[in-house]
Image: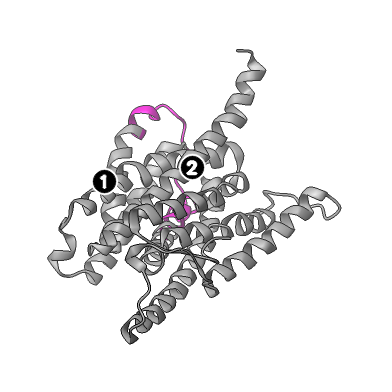
Amino acid sequence: MSTRSRRICYGEVVPFMVMTFLQCGQVGLSTLFKKASRDGMSYMVFILYSYTIAGLVLLPFSLLFERNKKLPRLNKQIIGRFILLGFLGYVTQMLGFKGIEYSSPTMASSMSNLTPAITFALAVLFRMEKVDIGSLSSRAKILGTLLSITGALVVVLYEGPTVIRTSMNSGLSSPSSYQSLNSEHSNWVIGGLLLIGDYILFSVWYIVQTQAVQEFPELLLVSIYNLIVAVIAAPFTIIAEPHISAWTMSSKMMTIVIAYNGLFGSSFATVLLTWGLHVKGPVYVALFTPFSIVIAAVMSVIFLGDSLYLGTYV
């Protein structure tokens, strides 16, 4: 393979395949989490366990493979950036997983349409992306940003007729069923609003992480980030979940989803995501988030028994 071919493969083909793979993995995580939350798993305990596992798993690898790399000297700015990354990461996880509890993985994937739009706007603000109004490409990005935001609002506020109804959600005409539907719609809106907050902050995280990876190698950066999130999460989780029952693995699904997120989602998947930010930038990475919509819709129907409505995805 020639040098030019290797450059194209590394710069275009590999990032495309990696980002697509990560979206599939994220949808799988959302589906497993929804299943475990129905079994009574605390989302706060889930976040704490996952990030603790991820940090402890990645730290030895980062020390082994990146010990010879030159690192910048620690200063207040770098420490502040790490704390900001950890805080953003924790809050986005809180909003995201609570939003999935209230709604569904399909809605979470649909709301991901916001990520490219907000990331593009932030990239322009931080001068990572240039906008030329006379350019067709720039006008298309601006139009796409407006459409993405509009689509996200439609997903939250409009739940149309059923496209696919599962036996779990088959309609009943009793008064209690109408109350259940009203409650479900209310949860749908709350979940959507939480997910909007999640994707707004996640776009900010993209920008900050892109800046941080210019100075720190991916493995070390992500391992430190995970441990900081765990440290931030610990006191909040202890206060919010004082009962020991919330901390125990009461079902096999809880163990599976925590292990999955700790060993893959919050660890190596985040390393790959950070590598993508380093190689291609935040806007490129964000463009892949809408790919998860169809995958999430199919998995929600098959594994969770959710119904699909017109307006569930845009």
- At 33% across and 28% down in the image, what residue appears? 64
Locate the N terminus and report the quarter of the image it occupies: top right
Pick the front one: 300 or 14: 300
- Reading the image, the residue beneath label 1 is 259
The quadrant in which the C terminus is found is: bottom right
Q: Badge 1, how many Cα within 10 Å: few under 14, some, many 20+?
A: some
Q: Is residue 230 magenta?
A: no
The x and y percentages for residue 196 are 51, 66
Element marked by disc 1 = helix
- x%, y% of residue 197? 50, 67
Q: Looking at this rendering, what residue extends furthest in the bottom direction?
A: 175
Q: Residues within 10 Å of mark 2 (few under 14, many from 20)?
A: many
Q: Which residues are magenta?
A: 62-87
Mark 2 lies on residue: 273
- Between 168 and 122, the one nearer to me in the picture: 168
Instruction: Find residue 176 and report its image quarter.
Output: bottom left
- Which of the two residues, 2 or 254, is positioned nearer the viewer here? 254
